[in-house]
Each structure stands twice: as C-alpha cells, then as structure tokens.
C-alpha cells in the first residue's frame, strides 16, 4: 500500500515524537481475511522510523489460504491529513 497527498506525491507518516513514537505498523496497517476470519499478514517494517514512511507491505503464505475462497485485504492509515491510499497485489513464488 502507499499513501499520497492531494497532489499525488508520497505522504510520509511518522509515529509521533521519539519519546511517544508508535511503530509504523500501527500507523500504516494491512489486514486480510478469508471467509470472515482473519488471515495472518506478516509485516516486516514495524519499526519506529524517524523519517517516516509512505508505504507498507505484508505477506501471506499460500499454505495459510484456501485458493477457492476470496481474500479481502484492508489497507488503512492513521495519518491525520487527507490522503489517498492505494494498493497493489503481487504473487511471489520463492525458489528453494
């Protein structure tokens, strides 16, 4: 997912001041569900980043999903400013 301002430029979010900072995984969130039940999303960017982020990404392993059932993905932001949130979905096959 990516958040952009009204001019379509990347809008960075910060988790607050360094003493009260939330991690970016709590500011830019990705949730997934299948058949009304949560589907685990692995997030690897859940850190306090002083410069902020305008994007987020997550992964869900195919073994955790039923290929015959639709997956719903919800992306959201805690950004106070008016932003546009967009998302892209990729299939990645890892070779061992």
Image (spheres, rainbow, N blue to C red):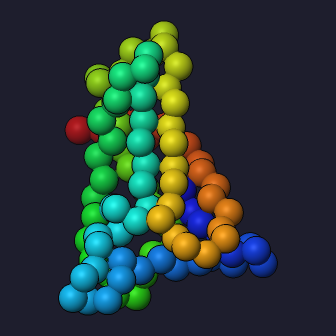
Can residue 90 be seen here? The reply is no
Is the N terminus in the top left, top right, bottom left or bottom right quadrant? bottom right
Is 85 on the left or on the right of 41, as rendered?
right
- Residue 86 higher or lower than 71, as above or below: below
Of residues 4 and 19, the one drawn nearer to the viewer in this rendering: 19
Residue 29 point in image, percent of width and height: 42, 55
* Residue at x 50%, y 37% (from the top left corner): 73
Residue 28 point in image, percent of width and height: 44, 62
- Residue 41 higher or lower than 28, as above or below: above
Of residues 59 and 6, the one drawn nearer to the viewer in this rendering: 6
* Residue at x 57%, y 63% (from the top left corner): 2
Can residue 17 be seen here? The reply is yes
Residue 22 point in image, percent of width and height: 29, 73
- Residue 32 higher or lower than 30, as above or below: above
Is 54 on the left or on the right of 8, as rendered?
left
* Residue at x 32%, y 89% (from the top left corner): 17
Asked which quadrant contains residue 33, the reply is top left
Residue 27 point in image, percent of width and height: 40, 65
* Residue at x 64%, y 55% (from the top left corner): 86
Asked which quadrant contains residue 45, the reply is bottom left
Is the C terminus in the top left, top right, bottom left or bottom right quadrant? top left
Is 16 on the left or on the right of 76, as rendered?
left
Asked which quadrant contains residue 26, the reply is bottom left
Of residues 46 and 65, the one drawn nearer to the viewer in this rendering: 46
Residue sitting farthest toward the top:
68
């Amino acid at each position: 997912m990516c958040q952009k301002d009204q001019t379509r430029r990347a809008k960075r979010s910060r988790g607050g001041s360094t003493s009260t900072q939330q991690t970016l995984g709590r500011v830019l969130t990705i949730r997934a569900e299948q058949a009304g039940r949560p589907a685990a999303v692995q997030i690897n960017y859940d850190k306090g980043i002083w410069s902020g982020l305008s994007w987020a990404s997550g992964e869900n392993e195919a073994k955790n999903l039923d290929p015959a059932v639709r997956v719903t993905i919800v992306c959201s932001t805690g950004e106070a400013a008016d932003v546009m949130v967009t998302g892209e979905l990729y299939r990645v096959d890892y070779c061992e």
